[in-house]
Amino acid sequence: MRIRIEFQSTIRHREYDGLRLALLHPYLGTLDAASLSFADHQTFARRDADKGIGPGRDGYARIRDWHESGPPPWNGADLTGLRSAITHYIQIWAPAPSPEHSRPSLPTLPSARLASGRSR
C-alpha cells in the first residue's frame, strides 16, 4: 500500500488550503482519504499573524502558486502539526509491528535421541 499526499485545492485556480492524503491499494485503488487543513494545524499561523490576516480574511491559512518567480508559497510554514497528523494517519493504517521478544514463547520438546544398537 502507498499513501499519496497532494495539495488540497480551493475553488480558486492554484490556491490551496491544506493537504489531501489518500491510502492506495495496488489492486483496489483508493481505500481511504483524509483532508488536513492548514488552519486546523496552525501551518501558517506565524506568517498570517505577521501580515495581520485572520480567520475569514482572504489568504488566511492558504498558499497561492500564482507566480513563477520568488520564494515558494509554502516558505515559512510550520509543518509540526501536519507532520504529527500525517504520522498519526499512517500509524492507524500501518501500525508498528510488535517487538519479537514480547511474544509468549512456546515450550520446546526435548529432541529425540537415536538409540545405539540394532534396529528391529
Image (cartoon, helix red, strand yellow):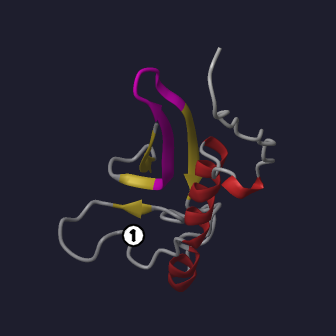
Q: Closer to the camera, 14 or 84?
A: 84
Q: Is residue 112 above or below residue 80?
A: above
What residue appears at the point 59 percent right and 58 percent down from the top-left corner? 87
Asked whether 21 falls inside the magenta stretch, the response is yes
Q: Closer to the camera, 73 or 98?
A: 98
- Return the x and y of residue 66 as percentages of the image width and height: 27, 60
What residue appears at the point 18 percent right and 65 percent down from the top-left corner? 68
Q: Quadrant of residue 86?
A: bottom right
- The residue under label 1 is which amino acid type? Trp
Asked whether 29 falls inside the magenta stretch, the response is yes
- Return the x and y of residue 110 as percentages of the image width and height: 76, 41
Q: Is residue 59 left or right of residue 54?
A: left
What residue appears at the point 38 percent right and 76 percent down from the top-left corner? 75
**Position of the C terminus by quadrant:** top right
| Mark 1: secondary structure | loop
Q: Main secondary structure of the magenta part?
A: strand
Q: According to the image, label 1 marks what residue?
A: 74
- Return the x and y of residue 3 as percentages of the image width and height: 46, 44
Q: Is residue 96 above or below residue 26?
A: below
Q: Which residues are magenta?
A: 17-31
Q: Quadrant of residue 11?
A: top left
Q: How many marks?
A: 1
